[in-house]
Amino acid sequence: MTASKRIISRVVAAAMVIAVVSPSILASVAGAASLSQVTVRFDRMKISTQTTGTVCATPASTATEVDVRVTYPTGYTLGTAASFTVSTTNLSWPSGAVAWTGITTASNVTGQVVTFPSGDLTAGTLYCFNWANPAAVTVKGTATASNTGSVATYATGAALIDDASYSTASIADDQIVVTATVPQAFSFALSGNTDPLGTLSSGAIASSGTPRTVTINTNAAGGWKVWARDVSTGLASTTAAKTIASTTPGANSTLTAGSEGYNTGVTPTNGGGSGTITVATAFVGGTSGRGGGLNTALASLATSNGTATNHVLSLTNNVTVAGATPAATDYTDTITVVGAATF
Amino acid sequence: MVSFAGILTATMLSLFAASPASTNFTLKSFDFGNGGVTSSSSSYNLNGTTGTQTGASGTNGVTIISSGRNVTQNASVPPSATLTNPSGSYNKLRIVINTAGNPSDTRYAVAISSNGFTTTNYVQSDNSVSPVLGIEDYQTYIQWGSATGFDVLGLQPNTTYAVKVSAYQGAFTATAFGPASANVATQPTTITFSVATTANSTPPFNVNFAELAANTVFTANANALINLTTNAASGGAIYMKGANAGLLSSSKSFTIASATADLSIAASGYGAQVGTIGQTSGGPLSATAPFAGTINSVGQITADLQKILGLSSPVTGGSAEIKFMAKTTSSTPAANDYADTETIVAAMKF
């Protein structure tokens, strides 16, 4: 190219620019831009299953939207327009998404195309909305990949603004059923197997120096029960052929110094678990000499109504003697304590 | 060859649509003679002018060019560009412009059509497509990616396109658009997705904890198995929710509540953890917090869908396993009917 050819004619240059941008030259050109970040999430993908879902898209064009039309894949069964109620609750929407402006219940369903009225949208903003009624959409009846649909925004006069396609899949099953068994557990422990009451005096109530405890752990939803009985219905001396009789078995009592009597009082300590301990009325203890008499039949000491973590019963044995009570060193009783749970 | 000189009239603007053109030959150079008279034509294209501006205006307000010294000419009409879909995309195609020996400062505009140019759009300077062609959309060969080319974006899936290229050099009139490229199709949007377990490939999909003895962390006897292939340009996500937000015993009306926790430390709980992840290509699939834990750390499974896996680009042969883990206390009610139903779905971002 010669130097003279490179010299620019400003007039021609100006004319060229006009030609490039002249609407008259571009009059035959028309077309929609693409929505981006288009997501249509079906909350169920299992075949023949009703589903709610979410629609998201980012407009590309600056225009005044009046509706958004969602084309559902072929084979998906759609309800009436009224069934396409919507919400703008953020249900794990993509990051940065905002509520779709002016979205309302669908106004029309024609074929696979559902028209939702929309407010004006801002180009470059990611909008989302949910169709909230599962009766509106039923996934197709066969499992297939790449079930294609589209999302499109329109201006007044059904003028297409932006559109884009999406794909989803219908699958045989979208659910995993997780099952488990929690095995039954029950533990029951006595803190000791002896309870020396020492030398008895007619002037005082003798009680367990270190009350023995029962500790219960169980995952029985129905709770547990503890029972007790003794072998002699009192403290018996073989050498003296004398029994200090249990005081009114089946009824709560408080012993009095100087009068013969023998009973067992129970105090509870709730640990963890859902259960609460209830001591049987006859064996309520907690104060000096208070409790219930045991006999040879198992009697309920306490119950709990739920699971137990370190539920504790404290067993206090009380005894009183009179001046005429025969002396002996072998007064003894054997108390059997058992427990069970209700699973 | 046509030459004009002297005063250009406004009517001449309509003559600039095309320079000497041929689909068989490239005109490398042509020349202009001297002289000329005031002229207008509705039958010929203006290829160049001679003379320089005088700065004076004629009676119609047009610029007056003095006669006699200078000439101009158009760039060569570009031959057809190379149009391909190298990545099998659904929304973009690759264009490599053929310069036809035009100077390096030559600028090119690209027209694109999906219907044989009955309707024409233009590639914008940001590689998007618009019905409007602006002067800024004429870019140099280098700006259009040189021999590597560039991707025109925002195309429709499963659609066949062709392109044409126009050029201008210096400040001269742009050439007509050259011949169309070969027709090349975008791919349809695609997703292949499945849910199964490592124990069963066909439904029903059940996984089980043998027995949840207290104070020990257990993992279910099988994992959920997800498979995903998609060409979604922006990737997407896999979501999960639980019907009971925990393991529910209907007979005991008790739920081992799902929680985000390290079950090694927590007294009890139930949750999910993404295990093995992989893909043949693309992606990658990645676990989303709080499901990306290790050892005994799990994420809470809620009654609403939560993102459990994500990807930001297309993936082929993506797979992921999801573990279910649980721990109970000694006071968790005994029962053999603890259960939860996890729903797993995928949604891609096209």
Image: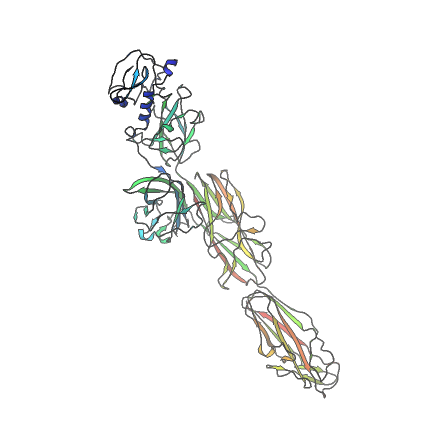
Say which quadrant the C terminus of chain B sits in: top left
Location of residue A260 in the rendering, given as x and y in whole percent from the top left corner: 68, 85
* Residue B286 against residue A220 in the figure, above or below: above
**Residue A288 left/right relative to B2:** right
* Front-most of residues B109 and B85: B109
Q: Is residue B35 visible?
A: yes
* Front-most of residues A79 and B211: A79
- Residue extending farthest to the top is B34
Say which quadrant the N terminus of chain B sits in: top left
Q: Quadrant of residue A120?
A: top left
* Residue B257 against residue B195 in the figure, above or below: below
* Residue B150 against residue A172 in the figure, above or below: above
**Residue A165 left/right relative to B268:** left
Location of residue B186 in the rendering, given as x and y in whole percent from the top left corner: 39, 34
* Residue A115 against residue B40 in the figure, above or below: below
The colour scheme is rainbow
* Front-most of residues B83 and B252: B83
Q: Quadrant of residue A36?
A: top left
**Residue B168 left/right relative to A273:** left
Counting the numbered discs, the total is 0
* Front-most of residues A141 and A250: A250
Q: Quadrant of residue A222?
A: bottom right
Q: Is residue A145 visible?
A: no
Location of residue A69 in the rendering, given as x and y in whole percent from the top left corner: 33, 44
Location of residue A150 in the rendering, given as x and y in whole percent from the top left corner: 36, 42
- Residue extending farthest to the bottom is A324
Residue at horizontal 29 percent and vertical 22 percent from the top: B16
